[in-house]
Amino acid sequence: MSLLVVGLSHRSAPVSVLERAALAPDARGPLLADVVGAEPATEAAVLSTCNRIELYADVDKFHAGVAELSTLLALHSGVALEELTPYLYVHYEDRAVHHLFSVACGLDSMVVGEGQILGQIKDALAVAQEQHSAGKLLNDLFQQALRVGKRAHSETGIDKAGQSLVTFGLEQLAAAEAEAPDVERWAKDKRALVIGAGSMSALAATTLWRAGVTELVIANRTLERADRLAASLGGRAATITDVPRELAAADVVVSCTGATGLVLSAAVVEAAVAGRTSPLALLDLAMPRDVDAVVHRVAGARLVDIESLAEAAADAPMAADVDAVRGIVGDEVAAFGAAQRAATITPTVIALRTMASDVVAGEMARLEGRLPGLDERERAEITQTVRRVVDKLLHAPTVRVKQLAGEPGGASYADALRELFDLDPQTVAAVSKPNRSGHEN
């Protein structure tokens, strides 16, 4: 395993840089194609969320891999490499596994313990599979990360430590109007406008609907998608061009689109709040931002965006269950590493047993030439006896070498086995060569 992660997140970069580096959904495919097309990488996946962009790759050269992934991340994000580099972090092998498992459990999220990241990891794996850039390593890694994340949520109280960005953001808006923010009490009987129809927008719309908003409007560039989401929640659909009119009638607005430019300018918001007696609450969960940051200074409007959420989350209390989740992550990383190291011995063991089988076949052919009078029963009995002897001789060393291979540095035992039995490295490599669909030949 030569797993490499190069990325940036809310922990390493300011929101202004994350905003500019954000990948559009249709940019992930070309990025993955370029990564696996580069010499150091054989597999690749990209995890792109509102507060992180990470490239995962199986590389054969560490330094060349870091350089190539960093360059491609800069190229596809549109941020110059020299500007991006100070904010990039690098994890390799077991540390890379530990990082992804921590991310899956919500330990690295802006709001600790939030569970939406699991859906985003699942989506990252699906995109890599569609692009045929995920081979056995990344398929195993991401699927295990999903299992680890689910285990953390089912076995601990990490859910109590955090919530989705939607709920956290709405709580920040509610806090401006009450000492003890209660989203349901605050949102009840309000008119809500949700801009966008993706997964985050759907979560926001569902949260507001459950809180008892009196009206729910879904606005999207594609009216059909808006209509589908609105119909499922008893709301109504609108197009992006309807937003200024809907904005004037709304009490709370949540925006999360994939637009590369602003969806709500300061001028549009100013026009919407003109003459209002109640404040307009806006939650911007998009990256890059949907709502002009100048809206923070617009009288009659209250804006919570990714940047202000990051500041609020920094002061949020950590739950005691976080330590339990860290323990789960540590155990799972060790188990995954042991399984991966043990798996590296399998092709060598198969090649050894194949060689032994060929030796038995060759010796039986020689015996038949020297003893042509053997009948079928005698030939079968001799063949079975020789195979039992060979199997018994190979059983203990192959079982033991599999056990040893699961330990740190276990790859050296596979090397020793190949050397002792003079196994052809190319033959070993051909025994179990992974492809990018996650299956083996």
Image (spheres, helix red, strand yellow):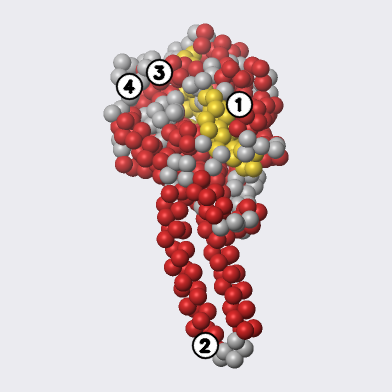
Where is mark 2, residue-wise? 378
- Circle 3 Cα neighbour tier, 10 Å, few/some/many (<14 / 14–19 / ≥20): few
Residue in view at x 57 percent, y 52 percent: 419
Marks 4/2: CA–CA distance = 78 Å
Residue in view at x 52 percent, y 87 percent: 378
- Circle 1 Cα neighbour tier, 10 Å, few/some/many (<14 / 14–19 / ≥20): many
- Across and down, in percent, residue 198 comes to 55, 36
Residue 305: numbered disc: none
Residue 120 against residue 272 in the figure, above or below: below
- Circle 4 Cα neighbour tier, 10 Å, few/some/many (<14 / 14–19 / ≥20): few
Quadrant placement of the C terminus: bottom right
Amino acid under disc 4: Pro
Where is mark 1, residue-wise? 22
Looking at the rendered structure, the number of numbered marks drawn on it comes to 4
- Circle 2 Cα neighbour tier, 10 Å, few/some/many (<14 / 14–19 / ≥20): few
Marks 4/3: CA–CA distance = 8 Å
Residue 353 against residue 260 in the figure, above or below: below
Where is mark 4, residue-wise? 317
Amino acid under disc 1: Ala
Q: Tell me which numbered mark, 1 or 4, is placed earlier along the sequence.
A: 1
